[in-house]
Amino acid sequence: MPHQGRVVFRKTQWVALFTTDLDLSVTQVIEYYGARWKIESGFKELKQDIGSQKCQSRNAQAVINHLHFCMMATTVTWMYADRIKADPQRRHKVKGRTSFAFSDVRRLIAEASLSEDFDRLCHKPTNPMKNSLVAVLLRMVA
């Protein structure tokens, strides 16, 4: 299949982009690469930050369950990020980036879990609750 190359000047340097779709404009190629980068970033979060690559199980169903639980944790983290009022401060500042990172949101969740109010969401009852948040989430990935 023929490849078409595009050379684009981005901020301080030239970047070469290639595509097999010869009908795409330069703008569309850049948009597709941007979307692809977000997807790759999401997989990195899933594998490294959440720990899906560290599953030690040799049982296929256990590996699938582990991956589903990691995907659920990633989704819950981004749902939390979507609902916070102010963007979290970047822990590791990157020149030219103003958006926060996945690890910044995870840090917020960890801090929130240590607050006294967190017990209202995740009770530590004497009798197990049938409809607790954790039970619902575990049923979702089972």
Image (cartoon, rainbow, N blue to C red):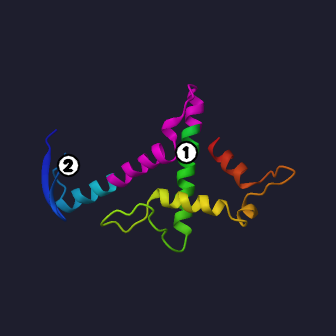
Q: Which residue is pictured at 15% across the width and 59% down the height?
A: 13
* Image position, residue 141 (x, y; %): 62, 44
Quarter containing the C terminus: top right
Q: Amino acid at mark 1?
A: Cys
Who is closer to the viewer here, 60 or 84? 84
Examine the structure image and report whether residue 51 is included in the region drawn in magenta: yes
Q: Secondary structure at mark 2?
A: loop
> Is 36 left, or right, of 7 in this rendering?
right
Q: Secondary structure at mark 1?
A: helix
**Residue farthest toward the front in the current orientation of the protein:** 92
Quarter containing the N terminus: top left
* Image position, residue 126 (x, y; %): 87, 52
Q: Amino acid at mark 2?
A: Asp
* Image position, residue 131 (x, y; %): 77, 54
Q: Main secondary structure of the magenta part?
A: helix
> Is 89 left, or right, of 124 in this rendering?
left
The part of the chain drawn in magenta is: 37-65
Examine the structure image and report whether residue 39 is included in the region drawn in magenta: yes
Rendered image: mark on residue 41: none
Locate residue 111: give its quadrant: bottom right
- Of the numbered discs 1 and 2, the one sitting upstream in the chain is 2
Who is closer to the viewer here, 93 or 39? 93
Locate residue 24: give its quadrant: bottom left
* Image position, residue 132 (x, y; %): 75, 54
**Residue farthest toward the right in the current orientation of the protein:** 126
Which residue is the site of mark 1? 70
- Real-space CA distance between mark 1 and mark 2, rounded to the nearest whole angstrom: 34 Å
Which residue is the site of mark 2? 21
> Is 31 left, or right, of 55 in this rendering?
left
Mark 2 Cα-neighbour bin, 10 Å: few <14, some 14–19, many ≥20: few
